[in-house]
Amino acid sequence: MIRRVLVANRGEIAVRVIRACHELGIEAVAVYSTADRDSLAVRLADRAVCIGPPPPNLSYLNQANVIAAAQITGCDAIHPGYGFLSENPTFVRACSENDLIFIGPSPEIMEVMGDKASAKDAMRAAGLPLVPGSPGRLASADDARPLAEAAGYPVLLKAAAGGGGRGMRLVEDPADLADLFTQASQEALAAFGDGGMYLEKAVVAAHHVEIQVLCDGQGGILICGERECSIQRRHQKLLEEAPSPFLDDATRDAMATAAEQACRHIGYRNAGTIEFLVGADRRFYFMEMNTRLQVEHPVTEAVTGIDLVRGQLRVASGLPLEQTGRATLRGHAIELRLNAEDPSRNFMPSAGTMTRFRPPLGLGVRVDTHAFEGYRIPPNYDSLVAKLIFWADTREACIARALRGLAETEVDGVSTTRELFRDILVEDRFRGGTYTTAYLADAAADLPSLVMS
């Protein structure tokens, strides 16, 4: 087994990985910027190393500093968490060159699946259904125009080298194509250093459903069910649940089979997620693959009983999976992302000190957080404060438990998404389980805490 891991991240995911390491008897080393000097991850780690000032490019994205921190503390592996360097093939190669195990897939797989155009080529070869669109990167809006006309408007322009909603534009009118192409390309260049674009047909009344996979180096594949991730703001997820209330058993099985085909075709290793768009007719299309652990992995852990981070550490140590095939699912789980944002002001970020923080407790409640009473939320990073995960035997009981948990949750000093979730959990579209990626816009009038511009 790996004996000492450098956790190359911050916040709740750093805490999550440190705890998994400790449960396996593995030492954990935290890295931190000066803004995170007093963080919970630093407190829980066996050792901690400052790697720079608050700006991410000078600390958490500084590859040389992260590698140096691993070397001076005698680590034999690095866990990247999610975000930052987690899907950077250059960093993976730097780890290898310095005799450090990267807890994730190979850089070659990361490069293929990290570029939307090459990922589509790989999944086409694996036999997965694809959304109609461009076969590869687009050089200009002129190249996009005939493809958009063939696919039929509306279409989506998407960054070839990134995600999270950056570099994405919905085009409903052909007259807007050129301007929106330029906007999306410039945004992608600023966010990812790559302005490459591709085009897809916009799936109307779409659901965002993803399949969690875990693969070892001996050909073993474990399919851990799906997550419904359709409630989003600015293409970033707010609420996830497992299993999806929209899928039927036939679609669920077909998507799991497609995910297994994808992993086997590319020779995938470690944890990953195959993301699909599902139309109102339950036809599904490959969207992208995230070659890392996802923020929402706890809902899968709740319904499978499988510790995905433990699985990552075992696979990276060269051990086979403890089980393969299809994981058995039990009950229902919902994750709510408690963000330091103000939904009544178009999700304006709310940095500051949490003068009071009392998360929920009780049966079927899990809280993944790095925050504590008196914690100062820095303005430099993602607004996620805590993930509130609820489990129960049925979806109805899970919703009731989540409402009870939110009623118990106390946060003072900053604005959060707490009240928005209380509104969502009692709203008819959500209760019916047929909500789509347009949910916030469609249900805004019935969500009193939400004001969107």
Image: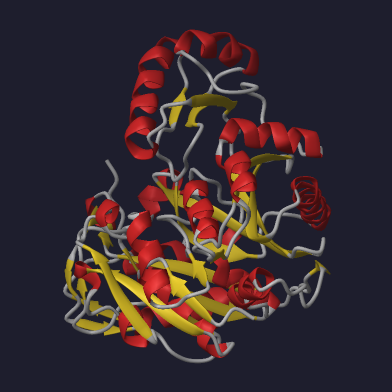
Q: Could you say where residue 160 lies in the image, as x and y percent from the top left?
A: 51, 32
Quadrant housing residue 301:
bottom right
Is residue 394 toward the left or the right of residue 410 in the image? right
Quadrant housing residue 379:
bottom left
Q: Could you say where residue 58 lies in the image, as x and y percent from the top left?
A: 25, 55
Residue 367 in view (yes/no): no
Q: Could you say where residue 170 lies in the image, as x and y percent from the top left?
A: 45, 28
Of 341 and 133, which appears nearest the observer?
Answer: 133
Colour mapping: secondary structure
Is residue 128 toward the left or the right of residue 209 in the image? right
Is residue 31 toward the left or the right of residue 312 in the image? left
Vertical placement of residue 415 versus 47, above or below: above
User: Residue drawn at (59%, 39%), measured in percent from left and top?
Assistant: 205
Q: Could you say where residue 39 lies in the image, as x and y percent from the top left?
A: 27, 78
User: Residue drawn at (32%, 34%), measured in percent from left and top?
Assistant: 190
Of 330 and 2, which appears nearest the observer?
Answer: 2
Residue 149 in view (yes/no): yes
Vertical placement of residue 76 versus 206, above or below: below
Tally the marks: 0
Q: Quadrant of the C terminus?
A: top left
Q: Quadrant of the N terminus?
A: bottom right
Is residue 61 toward the left or the right of residue 379 in the image? right
Of 391 and 77, which appears nearest the observer?
Answer: 77
User: Residue drawn at (48%, 61%), measured in percent from left and top?
Assistant: 239
User: Residue drawn at (74%, 40%), measured in percent from left and top?
Assistant: 283
